[in-house]
Image: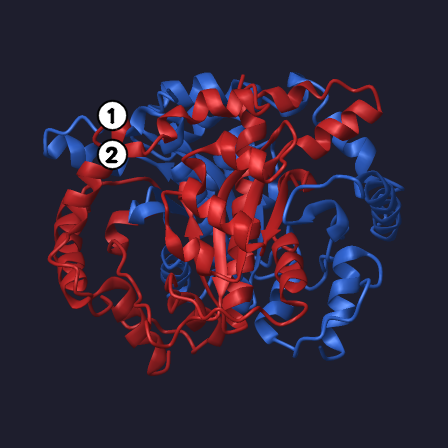
Chain colours: A red, B blue
Amino acid sequence: MDAETPSLLAARYGTAPDTALPLPANPVIEALLAHRSVRAFLPDALPAGTLEILAAAAQSASTSSNVQAWSLVAVTEPGLKARLAELSGRQAFIARAPLFLAFVADTSRLRRLGARHGNPMEGLDYLEAFIVASVDAALASQNAVVAAEALGLGTVYVGALRNKPEEVAAELNLPPGAVALFGLCVGRPDPAAPASVKPRLPQAAVLHRERYDSAAEEAAVAQYDETLKAFSLSQGIGPAGWVGRMLSRMADAAALHGRDGMKPALRRLGFPLR
Amino acid sequence: MDAETPSLLAARYGTAPDTALPLPANPVIEALLAHRSVRAFLPDALPAGTLEILAAAAQSASTSSNVQAWSLVAVTEPGLKARLAELSGRQAFIARAPLFLAFVADTSRLRRLGARHGNPMEGLDYLEAFIVASVDAALASQNAVVAAEALGLGTVYVGALRNKPEEVAAELNLPPGAVALFGLCVGRPDPAAPASVKPRLPQAAVLHRERYDSAAEEAAVAQYDETLKAFSLSQGIGPAGWVGRMLSRMADAAALHGRDGMKPALRRLGFPLR
């Protein structure tokens, strides 16, 4: 690869890559490697046609058996964005992004189709249908992210949209069988607050060959904890590592910020999860 | 946009776009719009470094709170690929692809971390943890798809890897708290069997502005059913529309090919799904 890819890999892993990768430089892959979440946006509205091309890119992702069990709600109204920000852990950047996309795991379209044809669509009652809808929505959203970044825009996912799923469903007028799985802020990055590439776990902890093998994991995690501490220091947020963050993030139900209630909430929203 | 984007949109929606999109041409977006699933591969092994760069692209996707709750098992052994093909609805193309990637929703790495620190990691017991792991895995996989296509490779997702999740977990040596969520075949497309862009639902059925509104849906679905019938005829598979396919795909538990058992299977695999 050319000079760019090794430095992108070094940023992505917070360390020099183990081996030089014997591949030609590729601008699309370099763009993927350079991804960073953006939380500081200029207030400018996006150019006309941006939403439609992001939606077309999202719809171009694969979907399980072509069921297309997802929908997109595009929010630009300031009041609605502010209420969604309030419901999503009061993250102010949500209200400041010119465009907020709610990615909806959506079995309701198939439910309505079944109702018009007198078909009970019992398959939609199973956890599997929620998995299909969630994976469909996630594949679509990642294409939207890649497309937005190709247009020079920045994005950040908002998992906290699941903190209060029923209130969010009411704000977005979601029908039964639909839930806002996560949000995505989209806007022009504020050049005064540039975002950095966040290092990830070494490949030794994530990539397995032929069969899963965690033998290299403990050392890889220890190395990564140091990498992330150094990265956090470089970002002015103190020596915050990965291990401590994960241990507190998953310690108990209270750490889930209300999302321990996802199962009963999903049932009330029309996902029986059999 | 230039001459390429309108024709890509026409293929993606099986009809001319409603309006010309007033955006400059963008090669990344054109690549996303041109996606098609590939099931016919040349047998050639992939160039050295391909797997590692796909994994790096996948790891560059966003992950909920940086938990990175997914793993990748890369399978090239012919015998193992053949057994996974057998477990995945006997889809022969799985065994013929030179590389099969199993995307794993993986809470086990965090479980092991907790065990080393005496932390019960109760948060992982909730359905929310499975959602986080599934979305993480899906975002990562879509980056891998975009990267593979940028390298001239073809891919197809294999949701049927969920038909027999416990048998697949045993083949891949997955630890408790990990499940193979779906597979991805990767290889050089066989030019003798080119794949086509499959049309998707009109944006009127998927994209909502400010709030969900299904008023335009029935007409959009009827139009799409005709579009897909024409596409199916062009592919030599008869006038198969979308409505009939969906009604049979979701009619009842039997149509799920065993995936109606996902919930108990996930519990046995170490996802309590509270």
Disc 2 target residue: A250
The N terminus of chain B - image quarter: bottom right
Would you place residue B155 above or below residue B239 in this image?
below
Would you place residue A117 above or below residue A171 in this image?
above
Badge count = 2
Do callouts 1 and 2 mark residues in contact (Cβ within 8 Å)?
yes
Q: Is residue B88 visible?
A: yes
Relative image position of residue B6 (x, y in whole percent): 77, 70
Q: Residue furthest bottom?
A: A3
- Judging from the image, mark 2 belongs to the subunit labelled A
Disc 1 target residue: B122
- Judging from the image, mark 1 belongs to the subunit labelled B
Query: Helix, strand, or loop for circle 1?
Result: helix
Relative to B235, is A240 on the left or the right? left
Q: CA distance from mark 1 to mark 2?
A: 6 Å
Quarter of the view holding residue A238: bottom left
Of residues A71 and B140, the one drawn nearer to the viewer in this rendering = A71
Of residues A190 and A182, the one drawn nearer to the viewer in this rendering = A190
Give the residue displayed 14% in from the left and 53% down from the top.
A240
Relative to B155, is B221 on the left or the right? right
Would you place residue A10 above or below residue A232 in this image?
below
